[in-house]
Image (cartoon, coloured by chain):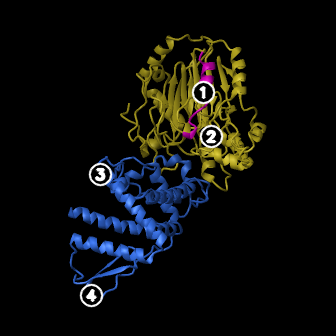
Amino acid sequence: MQAGQTMMGRRRFLEMTAWAGAAAAVKSFTPQSFQLVEVVQAAEPIRADERPFTFAYISDSHLYEKTLNERFVRQLERAVADINALDPQPDFVLYGGDLAQLGQPAELKIGAQILKDVKAPIKMMVGEHDWFLDMGDLWKDMFGPAYYSFDHKGIHFVTLMSVNEKDFWTAKGLTPMQRMQIVSGLDDGRQSAFEVGEEEREWLKRDLEKVPKDTPLVVFSHSPLYKLYRNWNFWTDDAEEVQALLRPFKTVTVIHGHTHQVLTNRIDNIHFHGMLSTAWPWPYAPQGLPKLTVQMNRVDPFNQTEGMGDGTIQVKPNGRVDKDYNLWNRNPMKVSARYLNSNGAEDSPAKTTIPSY
Amino acid sequence: MKTRQWFKLSFILIVAVAALTIYGVAQAQQKSAPLPQHPPAPGDGKNLVIQLCDGETNLEMKGVKPDERLSPDQAQTAANKLMSMWFAKTDPNVAEAWKKEMAEALAQKKGSEKAAPASQSEQDGVFTARERQVWERELAREVEYGNQIFHDDKLVGSTNGVSCAMCHPNAANTHPETYPKYQIQLQRVALLRDMINWCIENPSRGKKLDADDPKMRAIEAYIMAQRKGVAMEYGKH
């Protein structure tokens, strides 16, 4: 369809101001690839009683109080409007963590207030920016447990709290705010590494014991559940232990936040997808980028919402997913189950025209 | 041989500069005080006057006109004389320490003529470990100040909580090696500092810094330090 990723031209932008329209347009362009997807699906058991469905996500809004930074607030509102404009509506919306920037009550409250306008049911996940001021007390009061599971249309969903850190603050006598500020610095080496931790892994093990191994799993985690780049905590320290718990299942998908970019990985039967941020895009890490990642174009700093956005995830009856990145002011990117199933041989997203430095 | 003598002369002058001004210059830069200026060498215009890098010690070359070029031998003699004059009026302990370091450095240089030098400074052979330590410490101080500003929205003057590192962890995607370049959005050739100021004014909603503002200098130092080893590629888009 196109030789490379493109910025959306003015005309195209006007044509696609409604995201629903954009999604419909993409579908109508690709009847052939749609059929091929069906062929791939046939190779895996299809649960006749289930139908494909869609859920949407919003992530990493990093809100300050509106008086300090009105732009981040406006951008979360834009994502909510995007999702509310989807027709048909998604079955639910995942909020991917880092609603607040510094865990402040006012930040979490304005976030909660904006998310109240989301029409579909919302599933909340916590990020490190929400957590390290009061170790999650207020967040849990407002949104419920930090990790939980649920079943939806034949899929077992698990939301993890993957941004625990070993205590680096007590010995140094840091205040809660100092702790929060250290963790909020992506490249701040004074913090320790993200981890799910032993207690939660025990819980996950028990939770998964009840689930038949041919039931597809979709796992939500704020940090990527693999090891990409330690210096920016694009990393989960006990990733191997968590992956070991997921590996017995036939079909596993992990949807994560934190990295603020198009990010794709596959480790054996586990497919990984990153989520976009509504606040700002991160650069790609200088090392460890998974082979299957087709980078999004380098961001134009002069464009206020470039490289940000939200997205949808289509879940097929076999539990595999197509991931749509709704990049604001750019053509959307689709990273399909077929692309991952074929280890990148088929259905590759358009390659970037201006890669990172 | 002649070339080597010229080198010797310049080494001696460099050493003198380093000895007398390195600390003062570094301190002045931190505070952004005016840089030290040397007064012009005095003279009646009949003979050439050579000034030592301290800006105080002058030597009149009898029989050499002001626009005349010294032979390498004359230059070496002048340099030796100037250094002797400087030693004579300097604290004897300091002078002795300097002579010792010079001797060691020259011995080191002789040794290094056989072995392949590891760096330019070792090749020169007159930079002592102590000098390098001072330079590295001062540079590290500048980079660390830049590191702090880069990571602190208030220090950089942001009014909306947005610091540099929020979009550029470890100064990623700042690519200083690509400047100067024609910046399409600014419609002019931009230097790194132009983009730093653009970011301060726009995403961070702060006030732009003077090109010579200590904060600007420190931010540039931090960004450069993060890209050490990356090839210069000015104009790259």
Q: Marks 3 and 1, how far apart in space? A: 53 Å
Mark 3 surroundings within 10 Å by alpha-carbon count, few (fewer than 14), some (14 through 19), many (20 or more): few
Q: Marks 3 and 2, how far apart in space? A: 70 Å
Q: Marks 2 and 4, how far apart in space? A: 81 Å
Picture layout, residue B16 above or below residue A221: below
Mark 1 surroundings within 10 Å by alpha-carbon count, few (fewer than 14), some (14 through 19), many (20 or more): some
Q: Which dot, 3 or 1, sits closer to the camera? A: 3
For the record, the magenta segment spans A231-247
Q: Which residue is mark 4?
A: B45
- Contact? badges 3 and 1 (CB < 8 Å): no
Q: Are marks 2 and 4 on the same chain?
A: no
Q: Name the disc covering residue B113, or none.
A: 3
Q: Which chain is home to disc 2?
A: A
Q: Colour of chain A?
A: yellow
- Image quadrant containing the C terminus of chain A: top left
In this view, the residue in front, A352 or A1, is A352
Q: Which dot, 3 or 2, sits closer to the camera? A: 3
Tell me what residue is drawn at x 69 percent, y 49 percent: A178
Question: Tag 1's secondary structure?
Answer: helix
Q: How many marks?
A: 4
Tell me what residue is drawn at x 46 percent, y 45 percent: A299
Q: Which chain is home to disc 3?
A: B
